[in-house]
Image (spheres, rainbow, N blue to C red):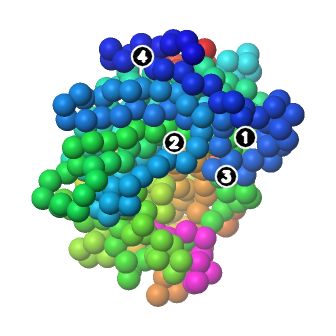
Amino acid sequence: MSNDTTTSGLTFDIQVSPRRRTPQEREAILESPGFGKVFTDHMVTIRYSEEKGWYDARLEPYGPLSLDPATSVLHYAQEIFEGLKAYRHPDGSIAAFRPEANAARFNRSAVRMAMPELPEDLFIGAIETLLAHEADWVPVKPDMSLYLRPFMISTDVGMGVNRPSGTYLFVLIASPSEAYFASGVKPVTVWLSEDYTRAVRGGTGEAKFGGNYAASFLAQAQAVEKGCDQVVWLDAVEHRWVEEMGGMNLFFVFGSGADARLLTPELTGTLLPGVTRDSLLKLAPELGIPVEEGRISTDQWREAAVGGELTEVFACGTAAVITPVSHVKSTRGGFQIGDGQPGPVTMRLREELVALQYGTRPDNHGWVRTFG
Ligand SMILES: *Cc1c(COP(=O)(O)O)cnc(C)c1O
């Protein structure tokens, strides 16, 4: 079929799926899609080899990848990914929130995992090409969006481990999704993980790398065993300094009303630099809430919460936007944050961010990129 987009010298070859779902089937799915469970009719793939660079960009029917059992990613886990959303704006247009930031982070992850960087215009071009054919999959209902998952895997066949793969596959898939936590903004209880470590200096914690998640599931299961919703990661050396909550960054609110101020753990190389975190660092001061990047220990967290100086805690990330943290548990017992309800600063920031993403507030930052 026709070729449409040319990017970085590459033209996306378009193969429309013969098994496209009917409008009725699609509408039925969009009634209640869950999160990351159902996928649209197409995907984008781009291949890489050392000789050719990036080549063979295409839109094709969504479907299984065929891999030799000796494919490098299945053994040595060279895999990185991104997560961002396409939102339906009130005028019917479709927009993504800071996709250039995801493109840049994808490349920082690629460098860490000794994988090739993907030119930003190809990353954005892949999204544009997919959205051009899947626009009807971007939900109209509030709180819903089309979750975009770009990822890259190593595809050399063979067991040699002396060097990274010489060939790679980039894939972009999309999943219509409703709120990440089915309960919406219901506060979560967290477990301070002292038994397990997510990331160490010089390690891979800063990269959006699949292996970081593989290494986290046991700790998350332990948190659930302890009656918590999410695990909180502490630094690897002293197991004392707070880093992240599951796959989200954390913010601490001290004081209240006009005196409220924010603290978020600084990027030490072991935290994932969230786009949502970065956006809040810019938004909060504009709303008159000072914000500081620093550090907070588990003892300081407990003392400030018990003393009432710490009034709110929330986690942030693309999938769940902003989630209040109401209770903390550890081997030393538990404590509550504030009155255990979502706090005013948490809800204010959430509302601002969501309004920007869904296009109900003007974007003064150049963060919103419209497609089609
Ligand atoms: C993706 C991710 C985040 C949040 O990043 P956003 O860009 O805000 O979605 C935080 N922590 C981890 C471990 C992540 O993988």
- Of the numbered discs in the image, which one, if any, rests on residue 301? none
Q: Secondary structure at mark 1?
A: loop
What are the residue bounds of the magenta stretch? Answer: 224-232
Give the label on residue 11, or none.
4
* Quadrant of the image containing the N terminus: top right
Instruction: Work out how far the residue at label 2 is from the one at label 4, CA to CA, in angstroms.
Output: 21 Å
Q: Which element type, helix, strand or loop, lies under badge 3?
A: loop
**Marks 1, 3: nearer the viewer:** 3
Q: Indicate the quadrant where residue 25 lies.
A: top right
Q: Is residue 77 left or right of residue 13?
A: left
Q: Position of residue 298 (x, y in %)?
A: 40, 73
Q: Which of 346/83 is in front?
A: 83
Cβ of disc 1 within 8 Å of ligand 1?
A: no
> Is 22 contained in the magenta span?
no
Q: Residue at x 51, y 42 (%)?
A: 149
Q: Earlier in the sequence, mark 3 or mark 4?
A: 4
Q: Earlier in the sequence, mark 2 or mark 1?
A: 1
Q: Amino acid at mark 1?
A: Asp
Res 37 label: 3
- Is residue 159 found left or right of 124 in the rendered image? left
Q: CA distance from mark 1 to mark 4?
A: 34 Å
Residue 137 at x, y percent in the picture: 71, 32
Label 3 amino acid? Answer: Lys
Task: Tell me if residue 244 can be seen.
Answer: yes
The local secondary structure at tag 2 comes to strand
Q: How far apart in space, not on screen, are marks 2 and 3 (Cα)?
A: 12 Å
Q: How many C-alpha atoms fall within 10 Å of the one at disc 4: few (<14), some, or many (≥20)? A: some
Is residue 204 in view?
no
